[in-house]
Image (cartoon, rainbow, N blue to C red):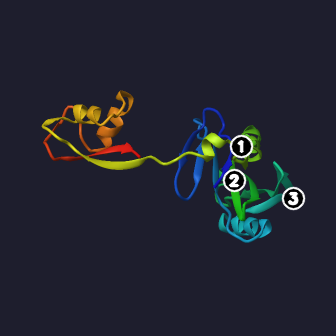
Amino acid sequence: MKFQFSVPQGWMYQNTPQMVQFAPKDGKALMMFTLGRGNSLQEAASNAVQQYQLQVVESRSITVNGLPALYVAADQVNQQQPAASVRTGSYFIQYNGSIYHFIGVSGINDFNNYISYFNNTMQSFRQLTDPSKLNKQAERIRLRTVSGNTTLSQALSGFGVPQARMEELAILNGMKLTDNVSSGTLIKVLGN
């Protein structure tokens, strides 16, 4: 996808195929990053407002690191429990033919305590240009036949697996390093 953004220091995060979620340890805020639904910034914003049943407080066009974007602040009002109402701050950013949506959420009374975290993360969105990250090559799993009765650790060493990666390869093979493997057994290693 060739983009990057920063995560607030000390915040926990979860990356799933649908979205990335971030939250501080105090649990009083939440930030999400996902694809916007729509063909324009305005359409994506309208769809999010409708999906989350928000009442728009502010909306304005902005740029984020040279990319066209739209900022929307909105409230989700809980009529039965007004204290449970939340404020959201969203950035809809157009990049590489897609629209990306950041949304920061907290209680209305706590929002100003988190707005700088939301803005810093959302404004850090930019094109990834670091060649060391762009040129990464996937490691391939190869099957190798064990030539004699041995332990998994000895077999992996014989196939040139570095000591630092032994435990990882044991997990990949669903075994312990001390498990015995028989001659002719296929095991997984990483390589070209």
Question: Which quadrant would residue 74 be assigned to in this image?
Answer: bottom right
Residue type at the position of mark 3: Ser
The Cα atoms of the two marked residues, 1 and 2, are separated by: 9 Å
Report the amino acid beneath label 2: Phe
The quadrant the N terminus occupies is bottom right
Residues at circles 3 and 1 in contact by the CB criterion of under 8 Å = no
Which residue lies at the image location 24% right of the left edge and 40% below the top edge? 175
Q: Which residue is mark 1?
A: 121
Percent across and percent down for residue 36 are 68, 63
Q: In the rendered structure, are the residues bearing label 3 and label 2 in contact, judged by CB atoms less than 8 Å apart?
A: no
Q: Alpha-carbon neighbours of circle 2 within 10 Å: few (<14), some, or many (≥20)?
A: many
| Residue 177 visible, this orientation | no
Q: Nearer the viewer, residue 62 or 111?
A: 62
Q: Secondary structure under badge 1?
A: helix
Query: What label does residue 184 carry, if any?
Result: none
Pinpoint residue 68: horizontal percent, then vertical percent: 82, 58
Q: Position of 33 compared to 166: left or right? A: right
Query: Which residue is disc 3 drawn over?
Result: 61
Instruction: Say if mark 1 contacts mark 2, CB within 8 Å.
Output: yes
Q: Secondary structure at mark 3?
A: strand
Q: Residue furthest top?
A: 163
Amino acid found under the numbered disc labelled 1: Thr
Q: Residues within 10 Å of mark 1 (few under 14, many from 20)?
A: some
Instruction: Specify which label sits upstream in the sequence, 1 or 2.
Output: 2
Q: CA distance from mark 3 to mark 1?
A: 18 Å
Decide if residue 85 is in sight here: yes
Residue plotted at (79% across, 67% down): 42
Q: Dot 3: few (<14), some (14–19), or many (≥20) neighbours within 10 Å?
A: few
Task: Name which of mark 3 and mark 2 comes first in the sequence.
Answer: 3
The percent position of residue 145, horizontal first and vertical second, equals 22, 46
Residue 150 relative to residue 13: left or right: left
Res. 102 mark: 2
